[in-house]
Amino acid sequence: MVSRHHTHETSCQTKEAILNSAADLFAEVGYQGMTIDEVARRADVGKGTVYLYFESKKELAFSIVDRMNDNLREQHRQILKSKGNPEERLQKMLISRVMFRFDAVKGFKEGVDYMLGCLRPALMQRKKSYVDQEAVNFVEILVEGRTLGAFQCDNPLETAHALITATAALLPYSLSPAELGSRQALEHRATVLSSLLVKGLKTQ
C-alpha cells in the first residue's frame, strides 16, 4: 500500500519538475513562445498532468516568478538569522535582493516585464504583493537595529518600502541581464548603494 506521505512527496516532485521545465522554457522563448505541450514534454509528463497542477499557462508563468520571490525571502530569512550586527545584515539583505534576481534571470533574453508584457496589469498587482511580503523581513531587521540603538527609524514599514524602492533601479524587471552589465559590476553598484542607504539610517 502506498503511504500518503509517499504520494504527497511524489506529487511535490512532479510539480517541481513541471516548474523547472517551464522556467527553462520561459527563459528561452518567453511567455508568448512557451506552450503547455512543450512544458509537458520536457517534464516527461502528460499535458493533462500539467493542468492538474496549473490551471493555465498564465498561472504557470506567474508560479515561476512566485517561486523566485519565495526563494529570495527565504534567503533573507537566513541572513536575518545569521551572525553579525544589524547594519551588516541589512546591507547583505539589500545586496541580496539585487544579486539574487540577477542570478535567477541570467538565462533570460529579456527583462521579466517585457517577457510578461501581455500580462502587465496582473504582473503589476503581483509585484506589489511581492514588495509587501519582502518588506516584512526588512521591518524585522530595522526594528532590531532600532532596539539596539543602531538605527534611527521612526516608521520601520515606511523605511522598509523606501529601501526596496531605492534598490529597484538595479533589478532585472525592465532590463535584461546584458543591459545590467557584468555580475561583478552590478554587485559593486549594489554594494555602494546599500552602504549609502545603511549609513543614512545609523544613529549619530
Image: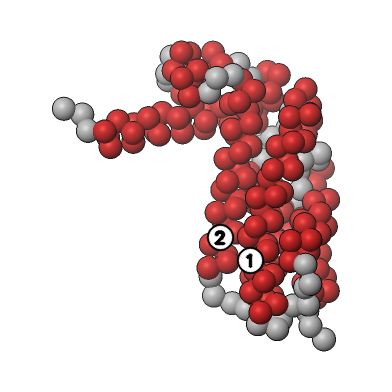
Residue 156 sits in quarter: bottom right
Q: Amino acid at mark 2?
A: Arg
Q: Position of residue 19 (x, y in %)?
A: 52, 31
Horizontal placement of 33 versus 5: left or right? right
Relative to residue 125, is residue 82 drawn left or right? left
- Mark identifier at residue 75: none
Q: Is residue 144 above or below residue 5?
A: below
The C terminus, quarter of image: bottom right
Tell me the SS state at disc 1: helix
Q: Quadrant of residue 155?
A: bottom right
Residue farthest along the bottom direction in this orientation: 204
What number is the disc on residue 77?
2
Residue 86 point in image, percent of width and height: 65, 75
Residue sitting farthest toward the left = 1
- On the rendered image, what quadrant is the N terminus found in? top left
Look at label 1 and name its amino acid. Glu
Q: Quadrant of residue 105?
A: top right
Residue at the (79%, 83%) spot, across then down: 203
Residue carrying label 1 = 140
Residue 178, placed above or below residue 143: above
* Residue toward you, 171 or 162: 162
